[in-house]
Image: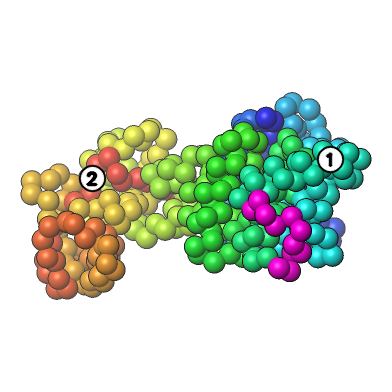
Amino acid sequence: MTQVNLRHLRKLYPGAQIAAVDDLSLEVPSGRLIAFLGPSGCGKTTTLKMIAGLIPPSGGEITFDGQDVSAVPAEKRGAVMVFQNYLLFPYMSIGDNVGFGLKMRGEDKAVIKKRVGEMLELVKLPDIASRRPTQLSGGQQQRVALARALITNPNVLLLDEPLSNLDAHLRDEMRELIVSIQRDLEVTTIFVTHDQEEAVLLADQVALMFDGELKQYAAPEEFYQRPVSERAARFFGGVNFIPAERKAEQILTPIGDFSFQAANRETAPTGKANLTIRPEQLKLNEDGAANTVSGKVRSRIYVGTYTRYKILIGEYEVEVIRTADMPGDINEGDEVRVTFPADRMWLVEGG
């Protein structure tokens, strides 16, 4: 297992005016599964390639277990990268593809054959060693690429958008497989994705990047409960934002004043900010509940397992989600009471 540290990492491509990655610092604990998350062009794949040694940083430091590897060649770094488009050799058998790294090391043929069999068993493809890549589905090719990376016992496994080319049901299978293998082998793993759901399902920690900068690095639940900004909250599906001013344990807003009792609220902004709360955390028609205001249902959309409401409160519209098993029929045009639970609200700075 290997701990990875990035310190003030920077990448400025030749001729560019703005750095692709700027002053990025974080720690990836040994044996953990970490996601770099963000929109296209935010610098996450560039960061992965710098960790792999495929491109040099313009500044900063990359260390594996405290040893600076910034200038160490990729083939000697102990980090292996699985690319989005698999990059299997089409003229080789699957067995030869998987065993390629060991062959380049000069390993004995019998050892390679044994290890190839073990790796194909690991990725649940035990009987395909003699096939060619063109005979496999996309999901199978992704598993082969993973086996080829793992056969060299890397210190760090790097995955670039590992599920983006797969159908929905195959993505679910690969998620389970990646997590299972990572837990079994305890290999430090970093993957890149633009899909927040994928990051939450797979990662122990998520590094959210915008415009080449690290904006939040935390456990997945932190992004839902305590986002650092409105932009971060919106990236994770936040839709409710109301101008507010915090005064100690009170949040003052144009739609009402609320008690604020969220965990770790000492880290929330003080003064002027935006109140945010996730749609599924708002309550409707709760008898005797504190932090309750009146509103009118503007729209109702039934989605099967839940119903989504748009509710006008004063001049502000909020979205509320109720699961299918919640009692009471609420329709468009109804007057309702909306409760903002004191421990579920959060405050964010705009942008």
Q: Is 150 placed left or right of 76 in the picture?
A: left
Give the residue drawn at x 72%, y 27%: 65
Residue with the most extreme top position: 66
Q: Is residue 294 visible?
A: yes
> To which residue does mark 1 refer?
110
Residue 335 rendering spot, x and y as whole percentages: 11, 66
Q: Is 95 placed left or right of 318 in the picture?
A: right
The magenta-colored residue range is: 125-135
Q: Mark 1 or mark 2, which has the lower sequence index?
A: 1
**What is the chief secondary structure element of the magenta stretch?**
loop
Residue with the most extreme right position: 106
* Amino acid found under the numbered disc labelled 2: Pro
Q: Is 121 placed left or right of 277 in the picture?
A: right
Q: Which of 96/26 is in front?
A: 96
Work out whether 289 lies above or below 92.
above
Q: Does the magenta stretch include residue 72?
A: no
Residue 337 rendering spot, x and y as whole percentages: 13, 57
Quadrant of the drawing holding the N terminus: top right
**Few, some or many residues within 10 Å of mark 2 (<14, 14–19, 20+):** many
Q: Can residue 18 be seen in this view?
A: no
> For residue 62, which quarter of the picture?
top right
Give the residue drawn at x 72%, y 45%: 117
> For residue 66, which quarter of the picture?
top right
Give the residue drawn at x 17%, y 73%: 332
Image coloring type: rainbow
For label 1, the SS is helix
Q: Which of 256/100 is in front?
A: 100
